[in-house]
Image: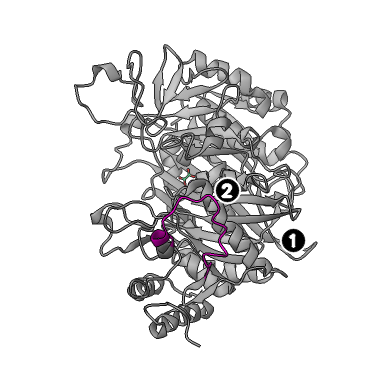
Amino acid sequence: MADIETAFEHSGLGNPHVREFVRHWAGITGAARVEVVSAADDGRLIEEALAAGEIFPAGEGRYYSRSYPKDTARSEERTIVATSNPADKGVYDNWRPSSEMKPLLERQMSGASAGKTMYVVPYLMAPPGSPLHAYAVGVELTDSRPVVLHMIRMARVGVEHVEGLEDPSMFVRAVHVTGDLPAMQHGTPDDQRYFVTVADERTILHYGSSYGGNALLGKIAHGLRQAAYDGYASGKFLGEQFMLIGIEDRVAGRTWHICGGFPSASGKTNLAMMLPPDALGDRYRVFFYGDDIAWLWVNPDDGRLYGLNPEFGVFGVAKDTNEKTNPTALESVGPGTGAIFTNVAYNPDTQEVWWEGRTPEPPADVAGWLDWKGEPIADRPEGSTEPWSHPNSRFTTTLANVPNIAPDYESPAGVPIDGIIFGGRTRDREPLIRAITDLAEGVYDGLTLGAEATFAAEGVDGQLRYDPMSMRPFMSYPEGPYAAQWLSIVGAASEQPIFAHVNWFQRDPEDGHFLWPGYRENLRPLLWLMRLKDGTVTGRSTPVGILPTEEELDLEGVDITPADLETVLSIDVERWRQEMGFRQAHLEQFDGLPEAIWAAHRRVAAALESADVDTAATPG
Ligand code: OXD
Ligand code: MN
């Protein structure tokens, strides 16, 4: 196709391997045109998308987009990791042979972009100049212009990222074909959608969705699944669904860095964008590095564990984002930010957007308001309780728009990691924070991370849905080697990060109120953790980790009753003993779990067995 060659020439795309990849898939998908994209094309593409009715204006320099109504979330069942090695099959990676998946996807994608433009999006998932650069280069082909606009916000996009590479053939080959969405048979036995990462060929083939989590291939498919696999195959790094923050103590003149994983709907973005409580605001500042992905590696310069955010933007859940829960997020999608809102409620007359939890009540004057499906709110029957926005509605904005972005967020190596935390929504048992100083016990804690099952049908007897390291939907190799990879990467660091399990969500069993006020107050347990690592506090030992004493936790200005405080700072030994049985069954699913992990499990179980139920102190 002469047109393709012209597109290469115009854009300066010279990499022969990228050219070959584009020609190959243009042939299969039957796209009518090819266009090579750089971030500088954003303004023009925005204008084109507005003119085509693919996006709508949402106030100064902000935009609104709406998905096909059945295409609003990631689909875990349709997501597959394929390789040529059956030993890559784990419990959660949904492994299939690549010899089966590649021809299948080629058939699905065959002719499926007919009449459309195929956009070529060269991108980088890392700060420029990063030591992990070789794993960060990719090219996404997509037949959706809104996907291109999202990619420009979520990844560093430009032809320069694929030119002059040390190995010009080393880039992730990512193909996104939208397909005929109404014909996908969503959720039926004949579901047509496939979201496949061919991990050992560094190829991503996603068909049948234009929703972010399925279609922005730099983010989850490359940034998590492929990166985790690459980190394992090379033995060099970990790719985790982690937030990453810095906490600066202006009095002591130092900054700590903490990263950590939380299953979805556990407040990871809110935590990453947190502001200090007023009482501590003069002394501390919290810096944002990332809210969703961290790559962890050992920096040979100083032997420490480093973390970097490979992303360029934030793809946050809009629901419940407001002045109290996350003022930082609101500012980061303010006028002039170029933010894109997806599947929230929209008013074309006023160009306003709204989502559940944005304000306590929806706008009183419903004139002009459309729900996330584009249907007028005014047409709803009296008393309708249907939400205005989709529960998984999103905002997309670049990191640079986040007001407390760390000054060194583009540091090529990332930042040294002092602490690794895990947390989920847990209504009982899990205290506010319990610190773990032993590596194997920390990894064990991550592997047994869980979030409360939200409906009775999903879990029984307070059982959690386990979500190892918050990676359950993103696992790309088996859990045993995954645990070994953790022990090997973090174990190689000269200075060990401290681990902790946190829980902001403990509730009163009688009236259900949250015991800990949360949000900005969450800085306090994190400060305690850093002091524990530095040796300036000692905490108190329990069978499941070290807990702060009341005195050690700086509580100035915190609104909490003494009884609630006592509960969040203690261990319910009976509940913990019960939990150990569930954990045992959870871990037994995994082949080849390192003995160190089993030893950690047995140590915790034995300590719980011999613990004094009333004080939960460790005997001896
Ligand atoms: C997710 C996301 O689905 O980050 O976890 O979008
Ligand atoms: Mn995520």
On the question of residue 276 being in view, the answer is no
Q: Residue 135, image x and y in percent? A: 66, 51
Residue underneath mark 1: 299
Q: Is 558 colored magenta in this rendering?
A: yes
Q: Main secondary structure of the magenta part?
A: loop
The extreme right residue here reads 301
Q: Is residue 482 left or right of residue 183?
A: right
In the image, residue 574 lies at what x, y percent? 33, 75
Residue 223 badge: 2
Describe residue 452's horizontal placement relative to residue 413 as left or right.
Answer: left
Say above or below: 249 vs 12. Answer: below
Quarter of the figure that contains the N terminus: top right
Q: Secondary structure at mark 1?
A: loop
| Amino acid type of the residue tagged 1 in the rendering | Asn
Q: Position of residue 443 (x, y in %)?
A: 53, 69
Q: Residues within 10 Å of mark 1 (few under 14, many from 20)?
A: some
Residue, far bottom: 620
Residue that appears at 73% across and 35% down: 160
Q: Is residue 335 left or right of residue 460?
A: right
Looking at the rendered image, the disc whose residue lies closer to the viewer, 2 or 1, is: 1
Res 435 quadrant in image: bottom right
Residue plotted at (49% across, 65% down):
446
Cα distance between the residues tagged 2 and 1: 20 Å
Image disc number at residue 43: none
Q: Earlier in the sequence, mark 2 or mark 1?
A: 2
What span is colored magenta in the figure?
Answer: 547-565
For mark 2, give the secondary structure. helix
Q: Is residue 347 visible?
A: yes
Q: Nearer the viewer, residue 539 or 13?
A: 539
